[in-house]
Amino acid sequence: MTVDPARVPTTPSAALDLVRAITAGPDSYGPGYVKRPPYESDPADWPVLGTDCVWRQESLPDDVLATLTRYSRLPAAGAKSEVRTAATVTLHRTVAQADWEMAETLEEALRCPDQQLRATERITGLNSMGSGYGTNGNTSADDYLIEMGTYDNPVLGKGSTYYIWNQVRIGPVTIAVVVEGGKGFDQSDLLTVQARAVAGMETKVRSELGAQK
């Protein structure tokens, strides 16, 4: 993808405005989704996977102009448990730095197939697959990555559920959507929800930055 350099923000404040305009909220997933508190992440925070395979929040690295995550959920209903989602958009200073983030994400799944997300949240058996533009059906982004594993969170009930992470890159922008939980849902249903949110954000990136194939 080629973006219009004149439309790419170069200051942190303008970059934050851009990622706010792109990051998906509950309406992006489908009917019934609502905001999950805290709805937005602190733009000064950056998640880092330690050598112990535990995620921590650190300060924003120098190569990132802005990043934002929005949290949503589909409340439990009947025999179906709650589904949790999070959408993240990051604008790097250069395309090369955004590309490195994609490579690092792929490496993390290989290094840590089992990861501690928060005190009570854990993913296990993580598998990942990456596809560059024009491979494996990827015709909408410079790079595409999907990870799937098993998600455990006692807050959502006993037993394991699904964990699905999808991340794409368009120029210097990376987009990611995670879907967690969903007892009573087929995996294909959750993949459809995820793909809807990713596609919507891809469209916004292309519109905001004038990206062309």
Image (spheres, rainbow, N blue to C red):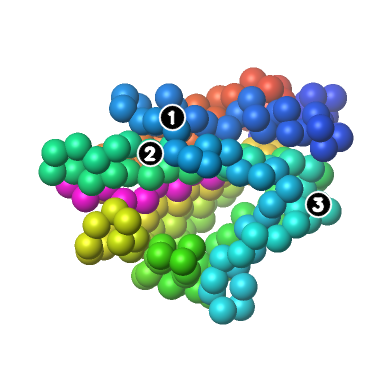
Along the viewing direction, whichever of 180 and 193 lies nearer the viewer: 180
Amino acid carrying mark 2 in the image: Arg
Amino acid carrying mark 3 in the image: Asp
N-term mark: 3 or 1: 1
Whether the magenta-drawn stretch holds residue 74 is answered as: no
Task: State the CA–CA distance, disc 2 to disc 3.
Answer: 31 Å
Callout 3: helix, strand or loop? loop
**Figure quadrant of residue 18:** top right
At 55% from the left edge and 62% from the top edge, which residue is drawn?
A: 106
Disc 2 crowd rating (10 Å Cα; few below 14, some 14-19, many 20+) is: many
Of all residues, the one furthest to the left in this rendering is 79
Q: What is the chief secondary structure element of the magenta stretch?
A: strand
The residue where tag 1 is placed is 26
The residue where tag 3 is placed is 63
Stretch of the chain drawn in magenta: 175-185
N-term mark: 2 or 3: 3
Task: State the CA–CA distance, disc 2 to disc 1.
Answer: 7 Å
**Residue 51 appears at what percent x and percent y?**
61, 78
Say left or right for 87 vs 62: left
